[in-house]
């Protein structure tokens, strides 16, 4: 998998990020880092609205509270027509369902990534607030240290990280 380190500037003319712009941030077999200071808010929400074309996309959230917020959005019909699974303490996947999106925390992703890889055709993975992965290494050491290794198992996927605090 290549790690795209060459900066690429994408310009958004609209008030909200367009589907086309967000799709450009995902290329198979490639990792990208997106600077939210440049693109503004709404990247994660738009990612969840991207059509999946019989694939499954994964959103790895910085903490359980974000997963719960997305869960509330889902049940308030903000992701109409999509089958979304939530994976964190208190929420489990039903592996019988064909999810369009899986929303999880890093710990749960690490624990279930092999099952997810075996069952679903994963296309895109977005790690939201990547800087928190690094900040959390002190108290969520195992989960955070294993995340890069487990992401490597999805080498044919498009993997992007988004952060407002790039290194």
Image (cartoon, helix red, strand yellow):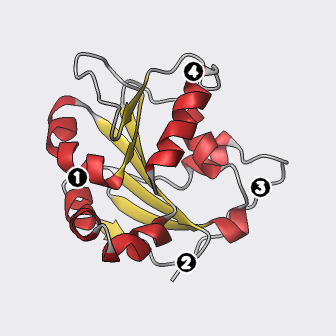
Q: Nearer the viewer, mark 2 or mark 4?
A: 4
Contact between marks 1 and 2 (CB within 8 A): the answer is: no
Q: Is disc 4 in contact with disc 3, using a CB cutoff of under 8 Å?
A: no
Few, some or many C-alpha atoms within 10 Å of disc 1 (few <14, some 14-19, many ≥20)?
many
* N-term mark: 1 or 3: 3
Farthest residue in the bottom direction?
A: 167
Q: Nearer the viewer, residue 56 or 88?
A: 88
The correct choice, above or below, for 53 with respect to 31 in the image is above
Q: CA distance from mark 2 to mark 3?
A: 20 Å
Disc 2, SS: loop
User: Residue at 28% across / 53% down in the picture?
Assistant: 107
Task: Point out which mark residue 75 bears.
Answer: 4
Q: Secondary structure beneath disc 4?
A: helix
- Pointer 2 residue: 166
Report which quarter residue 117 is drawn in: top left
Q: Earlier in the sequence, mark 4 or mark 3?
A: 3
Q: Residue at x 33, y 77 (%)?
A: 138
What kind of element bears circle 1?
Answer: helix
Q: Which mark is residue 110?
A: 1
| Of marks 1 and 2, the one in the foreground | 1
Foreground mark, 2 or 3? Answer: 2
Q: Secondary structure at mark 3?
A: loop
Q: Earlier in the sequence, mark 4 or mark 1?
A: 4
* Residue 50 visible in the current orientation: no
């Amino acid at each position: 998998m290549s790690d795209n380190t060459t900066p690429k500037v994408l310009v958004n003319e609209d008030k909200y990020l367009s589907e086309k712009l967000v799709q450009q941030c995902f290329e198979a077999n490639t990792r990208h880092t997106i600077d939210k200071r440049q693109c503004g808010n709404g990247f994660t929400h738009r990612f969840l609205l991207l059509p999946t074309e019989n694939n499954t996309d994964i959103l790895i959230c910085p903490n359980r509270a974000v997963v719960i917020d997305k869960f509330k959005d889902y049940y308030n019909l903000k992701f109409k027509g999509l089958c979304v699974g939530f994976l964190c303490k208190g929420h489990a996947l039903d592996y019988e369902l064909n999810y369009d999106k899986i929303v999880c925390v890093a710990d749960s992703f690490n624990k279930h990534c092999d099952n997810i890889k075996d069952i679903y055709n994963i296309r895109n993975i977005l790690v939201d607030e990547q800087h928190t992965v690094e900040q959390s290494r002190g108290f969520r050491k195992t989960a955070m240290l294993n995340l890069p290794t487990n992401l490597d198992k999805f080498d044919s996927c498009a993997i992007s990280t988004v952060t407002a605090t790039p290194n």
